[in-house]
Amino acid sequence: MPKRDNYIAWDECFIQMAHLIAMRSKDPSTQAGAVVVDENNVIVGLGYNGLPRGIGDDQLPWERAGGFLESKYAYVVHAEENAIFNANKSVRGCRIYCTLFPCNECVKTIIQNNIIEVIYASDKYHNEDIWIAARKMLDLAGVKYRQYRPKLTLKLE
C-alpha cells in the first residue's frame, strides 16, 4: 500500500503548533504563539505571550489603553522571546514560526540568537513603525522571513 499523499507540510505543522500554544495566553485581546525548530525539524522551544515567570496572571494589567505603567505593554513577554528563553538547546541556525510577524524587540532577540528564518501567519501591523523597524533589522542582518499561506484545508478524521 502506498503512503498517503494528503499529509501536512512541516510549515503547516509548525504554524498550527504556534496557534495551539498561543491558546495558553491569558491576554484577553491578543494571543500569540511561537515555535523554534532546528534544521532537522525538531522543536527546540515553544512560547506564548504572557507575564514573566513567578508573577501571577492577576498581578499586573492586561489593558491595551492607558499610561505605560497601567497597560500590558510594560510587562508582557512576547511569544517569540518566550520560545527562545524556553529553548532546550541553542537556537543558533534555527527557524521560528510565529502567529504574528515579530515586533522590533523580538527581532533583536531573534537576530542576537542567530535564528536564520522567521515564518509568520499574520502581518496585521505591517505599516506600523515597530514592524517597519523589525523588517529593516531583519533585512540588514540577513535573516530570511516569509508569510506562510496554507496550501490545503485541514480535515481531522
Image: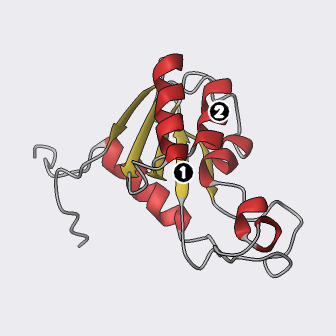
For residue 154, say whether it is visible.
Answer: yes
* Residue farthest along the left direction in this orientation: 1
Please give the residue where the numbered disc 2 appears in the rendered image: 108
Q: Is residue 122 left or right of residue 118?
A: left
For residue 42, say whether it is visible.
Answer: no
Amino acid type at image mark 2: Lys
| Structural distance between the alpha carbons of marks 2 and 1 | 15 Å
Residue 97 picture location, percent across and down: 46, 44
Looking at this view, is 109 or 25 the one in front?
109
Amino acid type at image mark 1: Ala
Q: Residues within 10 Å of mark 2 (few under 14, many from 20)?
A: some
Residue 72 picture location, percent across and down: 72, 68
Tell me which label, 2 or 1, sits earlier in the chain.
1
Residue 61 falls in image quadrant: bottom right
At horizontal 54% and vertical 61% (from top left) the residue drawn is: 32
Circle number at residue 13: none
Q: Residues within 10 Å of mark 1 (few under 14, many from 20)?
A: many
Circle number at residue 34: 1
Q: Nearer the viewer, mark 2 or mark 1?
A: 2
Residue 11 picture location, percent across and down: 34, 43
Element assignment for label 1? strand
At horizontal 68% and vertical 77% (from top left) the residue drawn is: 63
At horizontal 45% and vertical 62% (from top left) the residue drawn is: 19
Q: Is residue 5 left or right of residue 142?
A: left
Residue 3 falls in image quadrant: top left
